[in-house]
Amino acid sequence: MARRISPPSGKKRLANSAAPKREAHVPSREEILQFIKENPDLAGKRDIAKAFNLKGDARIALKDILRDLAGDGLVEKRAKRLAVPGSLPSVAVLDITGREGDGGLIAKPAEWDANHQERPPVVFIRASRNQKGPTPGVGDRVLARLFHGADPTGPAYTARIIKRIEHRKDAVLGVLRKLDNGEWRLEPVERRQVELAIDPTQLNNAKANDLVEVEVSKVSRYGLALGRITQVVGSVASEKALSMIAIHEHEIPHVFPDSVIAEAEKAKPATMAHREDWRHVPLVTIDPADAKDHDDAVYAEPDPDEKNPGGFIATVAIADVAAYVTPDSQLDREALKRGNSVYFPDRVVPMLPERISNDLCSLKELVDRPALAVRMVFNAEGRKISHTFHRIMMRSHARLAYPQAQAAIDGTTDEKTAPILDTILKPLWAAYAALKRGRDAREPLELDLPEKKILLTPEGKVDKVVIPPRLDAHKLIEEFMIQANVAAAETLERKKQPLIFRIHDAPSLAKQETLREFLRTLDISLARGAELRPNQFNHILKRVEGSEQQDLVNQVVLRSQSQAEYNPENIGHFGLNLHRYAHFTSPIRRYADLIVHRALISALGLGPDGITPKEEAALPEIAALISTSERRAMAAERDTVDRLIAHYLADKVGASFDGRVQGVTKAGLFVSLATYGADGFIPISTLGDDYYLYDETNHVLSGERSGKGFRLGDIVEVRLVEALPVAGALRFEMLTEPHPVPSGVRSHHKAKRFIRGNQKRPSSVSRGGRRGRG
């Protein structure tokens, strides 16, 4: 057991306060682990060396110990610090789940990666005398600062609430049904929730097939619980209601308060104060054809400097949202609450009201608009030589769609692109050719995972699912935006201006080892010891390109990656292979970008509406909030796609489809339909009469007797057995016969045994759900 390192006598030290210096000695593994646990904010290599007063050879010895601890899986790199696997950050979003014996609140993290532990740690909430606003209670979501428990026999964490984010209503969302006998029932949206009886005197004007919120009013030991309708969301007769289910289920704010709308309506167009006049610069917007707002514009020209032969000047102008959404205003508080816009196939839940996002801040064609612009100089090989930021007034010279701009470059112009082909479009593509050379030399992670898009009819029904073509026009805008984001991060870091970075950590050691074991079954090696770089993954992806394993390896490599997030501390972006990266290019739809704009305005003296000291102090909390909002949006968008496809396929039960195994779990297989991209579940109990082994490392279910089974990436044929539109759930039956599992896989797996066929299944076997991946 690790020995506790006590603070100096007479001084009580909080876990996140400055650590005292100790008498110089090389600490033991136990001492280092204890220090990391007690000092999550002071757990970098330099911090540990300083705390133990290590110099010279002692620092080399410390480095060796830390490498061994990482190799044993006892510590992991998290940002610039070391952490114990499964530990929580110093600031986190928590859900209050109940009370402990003495009445104190207990919570769990709102987000939890269960790679290290099956259950998230319990957090005890400290009482606070200075709590502002309503007192948090069970069901609330809060932002809190966390501390490791000082008593080994006590809770692992305690927390002090910074602010309450939202109150979770004790309500069940579902569809109201009327039975033949006249009774009313609620069919819950969530499959884990049970059916409720509805009090006929508490219908609240709801009708059959309405989507409603119900509060449980009476629980009976026998029979169904009784509920009353508290809110009618709308009818589920149309697919347009399915996105509203996700909005309510994930508690996404979707109605702007009157005070926010009023503030937006009072906003007046920005003036030329603190701005350069760039209205003569022929900037153009290139967006999806159905885009409602335009927050970025681009322009490029050859560099006239003789010292930069073949070089280019690339300009990116971004809507100046900071001119309208000022710190601590009603608009600002609502934008932070939302964190980002949420995009569904049938609607958008915007971060800002339409008056701001679609009008005053949208870079409309031939209309004066305020912007923050970056002028970047690149050499012929795409390496950035210099850049400068400017606060400007601009006028978009053309509004173009991606296919339209691409068609012009490919030789098919129209009345809008013909006049600007030689003067604007060709220089843009020439500059992109240089930037692409720089990107290729940088070697970011290149996963081949095409995204499907659902197209709806005017009535909101699913028309078809397509894979939009990946045009050079898309890649051009993407690379211009990446370079602008890099320039913003570099400028702010050079100015020592606090900001929120977009960070992406390298894969954890545990995920690296899992990937290494999987690749070994394909006779592919992955280097051990040295820090991985994106190009090592690219070499693996290139090796399987065009083979049967291509999709499988792409999926497994994707699953090995860490999740990108927002953080005021910079560790770089692993996937893009960049040392500095911050989101700057979409302030209309992302709060992180608005913070970066304000930081640039302050750092460069571009006007009075920059970042405030209060905001700077709150950056860790803001980063935690918007990272959680991003996850919430992704989950809601994914759930809506599932529901739309389930609704579309509801009358096709019994039909067979081609699909691919997208997830392997101990409960069964998730299969994605080739045509629609939606996932359905095949319970393990329906796969056939055999004892099935689940190999988590190699993503395989295989029969113990037959040696045959199914693996992640397998092409299969399935029959649709059940479609539940409200739950977004599809259940399939496997039609493809199991195939022999490669011997390399079977010899490696550390599997669990599941009794199948006519024999009784163990009670410990989970039955899975509609959600999840292998």
Image (cartoon, rainbow, N blue to C red):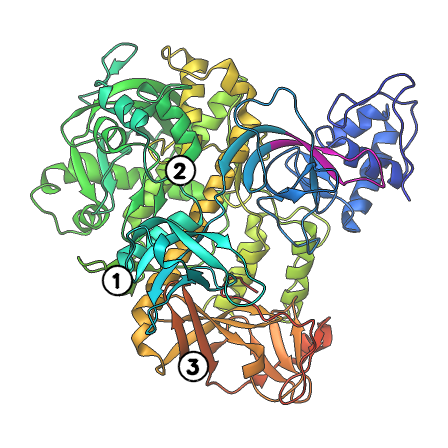
Magenta residue span: 144-160
Residues at marks 2 and 3, CA–CA distance in whole angstroms: 39 Å
Of the residues under marks 2 and 3, which one precedes in the sequence?
2
Query: Magenta stretch containing residue 502, yes or no?
Result: no
Residue in view at x 73 percent, y 26 percent? 16
Asked if disc 2 and disc 3 are in contact, CB closer than 8 Å, the reply is no
Q: Nearer the viewer, residue 700 or 490?
A: 700
Q: Going by the image, does 748 lie left or right of 610?
A: right
| Disc 3 versus disc 1: nearer the observer | 1
Q: Residue at the spot x=68%, y=82% of the render?
A: 755
Q: Is residue 121 above or below residue 272?
A: below
What count of labels does the image hold? 3
Say which residue label 3 marks: 717
Point out the tag, 3 or 1, that comes first from the N-terminus. Answer: 1
**Amino acid residing under circle 3:** Glu
Specify the quadrant of the image occupied by residue 154. top right
Label drawn at residue 237: 1
The quarter of the displayed image where residue 488 is located:
top left
- Seen in the picture, residue 504 relative to 753 is either above or below; the reply is above
Quadrant containing the N terminus in the rendered view: top right
Q: Is residue 564 above or below residue 641?
A: above
Farthest residue toward the left? 415
Q: CA distance from mark 3 to mark 1?
A: 31 Å
Identify the mark at residue 340; answer none if there is no mark: 2
Q: Amino acid at mark 1?
A: Ala
Q: Where 285 falls versus 14 (above or below)?
A: below
| Local SS, label 1 | loop
Q: Residue at x 59, y 29 (%)?
A: 569
Helix or strand or loop: what does disc 3 sit on?
A: strand
* Residue 188 percent location from the top left of the image: 43, 61
